[in-house]
Image: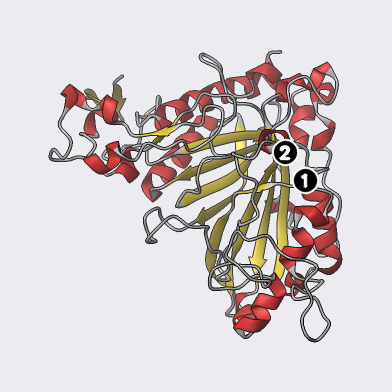
């Protein structure tokens, strides 16, 4: 597929034509990056003229890795953490309704499909990523509570999308919360991620305006000797307790089942998920003043490798009934890991897939940095809400963090061939 480059209508070019061939490392790096269609693979089969591995201009496996746009679930949910991310919300323009929203989702879906495949954007490509591969690009779309009134679809809004309750520790900025439409962009290359952001913003045209945008990052693939759980800006291993796709109840916890719960009007969400998005500022100066032993008591895990304070390695089960010589629990009663553990919350579980952020130094000299917390679940009333309520009442970590924005979004299932994201809602 070819595309004319902006201001050069006589030059037709495809990003994929520029990718060259994939070296042996990329060919060996085939991996299943998700569940139900979010397949991550090398672009070797798309090399021009069957070029030989190791040829001049070959991409590394990082650049060549592609995530499928179509599938049972949208990409960017179970896809491995990406090095760069943009998270943003749009509000539909005044007067825009269901027709305009459907046209926008059709444009966005086509752009996402092409960019995730390593092709140029369908409309006036900016050329930012011409010499890059897909780099594990994912684009994920969701609908906020207000979207359904704006489009006349209130009867099809799931009850799971009811506004989150107020939490006593919240210090939320309404201008950086909620929104009609939500977009998550992730990639392992900063320019590829920005290219997608720029293309989608241009696609919005007169139909929608950006309400808020946040930018994040994670450790780059290959930065450690072997793959490991990511660390957050507090230096803590973060994500040990995540549900695993290999677990038999993973889909039940993370994705909305077909055929319910709820009335038939909500069936468009079958295979979808709900994303809770929170900007959590970390009070890093205060945190860094604490000795490592105090930090570990706050979290309930060692800082070196994320192992529970009761012993073992990172994946060792916490022994919540183990007491020390002083008669106190080895993992304190207010430790973050204890309070948030599924066994302490009736089995409530969510898939946490965050980005870190750093937005400069504030006027008081402290870093404006922390976590773009994103978690996925089949039902936020059974996933995020009960856990956050318990954390709100007595989490030792609360002294060192500040919740500054919040949003909840219904994320439809992945599109079938020829579909755009959300079509089953907007045209059903």
Q: Which residue is mark 1?
A: 383
Q: Nearer the viewer, residue 417 or 225?
A: 225
Q: Which residue is mark 2?
A: 253
Q: Is residue 378 left or right of residue 333?
A: left
- Name the quadrant of the C terminus: top right
Q: Residue at x 61, y 57 (%)?
A: 240
Is residue 297 visible to the viewer in this orientation of the structure? yes
- Name the quadrant of the N terminus: top left
Q: Residues within 10 Å of mark 2 (few under 14, many from 20)?
A: many
- Image-quadrant location for residue 334: bottom right
Mark 1 or mark 2: which comes first in sequence?
2
What is the CA distance from the residue labelled 1 to the residue labelled 2?
8 Å
Instruction: Kindly state the secondary structure of the residue where label 2 is placed.
Output: helix
Asked if 285 appears above or below 252 in the picture, the reply is below
Residue 159 drawn at (x, y percent): 85, 32
Q: Are marks 1 and 2 in contact (CB under 8 Å)?
A: yes
Residue 185 drawn at (x, y percent): 51, 42
Asked if 411 appears above or below 192 in the picture, the reply is above
Asked if 372 appears above or below 235 in the picture, the reply is above
Q: Nearer the viewer, residue 418 or 326?
A: 326
Is residue 132 visible to the viewer in this orientation of the structure? no
Colour setup of the view? secondary structure
Task: Give the number of the disc on residue 8.
Answer: none
Residue 132 drawn at (x, y percent): 30, 40
Q: Residues within 10 Å of mark 1 (few under 14, many from 20)?
A: many
């Amino acid at each position: 597929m070819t595309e004319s480059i902006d201001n050069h209508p006589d030059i037709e070019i495809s990003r994929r034509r520029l990718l060259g061939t994939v070296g042996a490392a990329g060919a060996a790096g085939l991996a299943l990056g998700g569940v139900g269609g979010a397949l991550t693979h090398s672009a070797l089969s798309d090399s021009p003229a069957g070029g030989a591995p190791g040829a001049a201009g070959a991409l590394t496996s990082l650049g060549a890795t592609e995530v499928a746009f179509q599938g049972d679930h949208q990409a960017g949910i179970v896809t491995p953490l990406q090095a760069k991310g943009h998270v943003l919300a749009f509000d539909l323009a005044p007067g825009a309704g269901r027709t305009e929203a459907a046209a926008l989702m059709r444009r966005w879906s086509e752009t996402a499909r092409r960019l995730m495949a390593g092709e140029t954007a369908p409309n006036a490509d900016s050329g930012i990523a011409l010499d890059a591969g897909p780099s594990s690009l994912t684009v994920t779309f969701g609908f906020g509570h207000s979207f359904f009134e704006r489009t006349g679809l209130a009867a099809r809004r799931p009850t799971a999308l009811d506004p989150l309750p107020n939490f006593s520790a919240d210090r939320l900025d309404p201008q950086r919360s909620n929104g009609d439409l939500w977009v998550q962009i992730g990639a392992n290359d900063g320019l590829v991620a920005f290219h997608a952001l720029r293309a989608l913003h241009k696609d919005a045209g007169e139909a929608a305006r950006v309400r808020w945008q946040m930018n994040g990052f994670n450790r780059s693939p290959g930065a450690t000797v072997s793959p490991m759980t990511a660390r957050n800006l507090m230096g803590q291993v973060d994500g040990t307790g995540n549900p695993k796709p290999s677990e038999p109840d993973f889909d039940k916890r993370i994705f909305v089942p077909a055929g319910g719960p709820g009335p038939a009007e909500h069936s468009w969400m079958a295979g979808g998920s709900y994303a809770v998005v929170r900007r959590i500022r970390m009070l890093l100066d205060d945190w860094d003043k604490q000795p490592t032993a105090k930090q570990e008591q706050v979290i309930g895990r060692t800082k070196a490798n994320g192992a529970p304070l009761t012993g073992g390695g990172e994946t060792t089960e916490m022994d919540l009934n183990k007491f020390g010589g002083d008669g106190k629990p080895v993992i304190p009663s207010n430790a973050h890991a204890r309070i948030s553990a599924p066994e302490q919350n009736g089995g409530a579980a969510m898939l946490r897939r965050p980005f870190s952020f750093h937005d400069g130094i504030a006027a008081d000299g402290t870093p404006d940095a922390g976590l773009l917390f994103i978690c996925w679940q089949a039902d936020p009333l059974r996933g995020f809400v009960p856990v956050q309520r318990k954390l709100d009442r007595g989490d030792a970590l609360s002294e060192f963090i500040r919740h500054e924005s919040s949003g909840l979004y219904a994320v439809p299932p992945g599109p079938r061939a020829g579909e755009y994201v959300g079509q089953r809602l907007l045209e059903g």
